[in-house]
Image (cartoon, grey):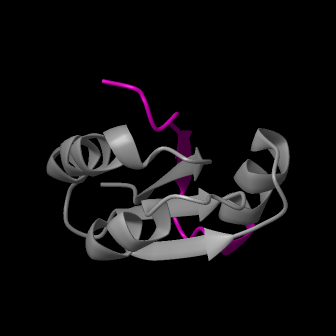
Amino acid sequence: MSRVSVIIPVLNEADVLAESLARVRAALHAGDELIVVDGGSTDDGVGIARQIADTVLTSEPGRSAQMNAGAKCATGVWLWFVHADTV
């Protein structure tokens, strides 16, 4: 099976982040990776992400900048971009 890298750009998403990340984590297979890219949050989103994600990065704000930062460090064959509030 091909390795999947899920990349989630976040900015002040602490209210929904734990549940969203847990759902994504549950859907992944062994060897897949979960990457969160924070764009300068002022809430505890980074702390929450560090508990669940494989990699937590920071970048300049803006979804495209955050998604590009996540893509650069991803090791999967497939890149799956998900918004933090996706259920």
For this orientation, the residue located farthest to the top is: 87
Q: Nearer the viewer, residue 23 or 78?
A: 23
The image quadrant where one finds the N terminus is bottom left
Q: Position of residue 80 (x, y in %)?
A: 52, 41
Q: Give the residue at the far left of this rendering.
A: 26
Quarter of the picture holding the C terminus: top left
| Residue 4 highlighted magenta (yes or no) | no
Q: Which stretch is magenta?
A: 72-87
Q: Against 71, is 24 above or below?
A: above
Predominant SS along the magenta part: loop
> In the image, is 64 to the left or to the right of 42?
right
Can you say whether 38 is above or below 22 in the image? below
Residue at x 69% of width, y 59% of height: 71
The reply to whether residue 58 is visible in this rendering is yes
For the residue pair 43 and 1, the one nearer the viewer reads as 43
Q: Position of residue 4 (x, y in %)?
A: 42, 54
Q: Position of residue 86 (x, y in %)?
A: 40, 26
Give the image quarter of residue 59: bottom right
Q: Along the horizontal axis of the image, is 50 left or right of 52?
A: right
Position of residue 35 relative to residue 63, above or below, is below
In the picture, measured across the screen, residue 49 lies left or right of residue 39, that is: left
User: Is 3 or 18 nearer to us in this picture?
Assistant: 18
Residue 8, horizontal then vertical, whole percent: 53, 48
* Above or below: residue 37 compared with residue 17: below
Q: Residue at x 44, y 64 (%)?
A: 44
* In the image, farthest residue toward the front: 42
Residue 53 in view of the camera: no
Tell me what residue is drawn at x 71 percent, y 62 percent.
40
The verdict on residue 86 being magenta is: yes
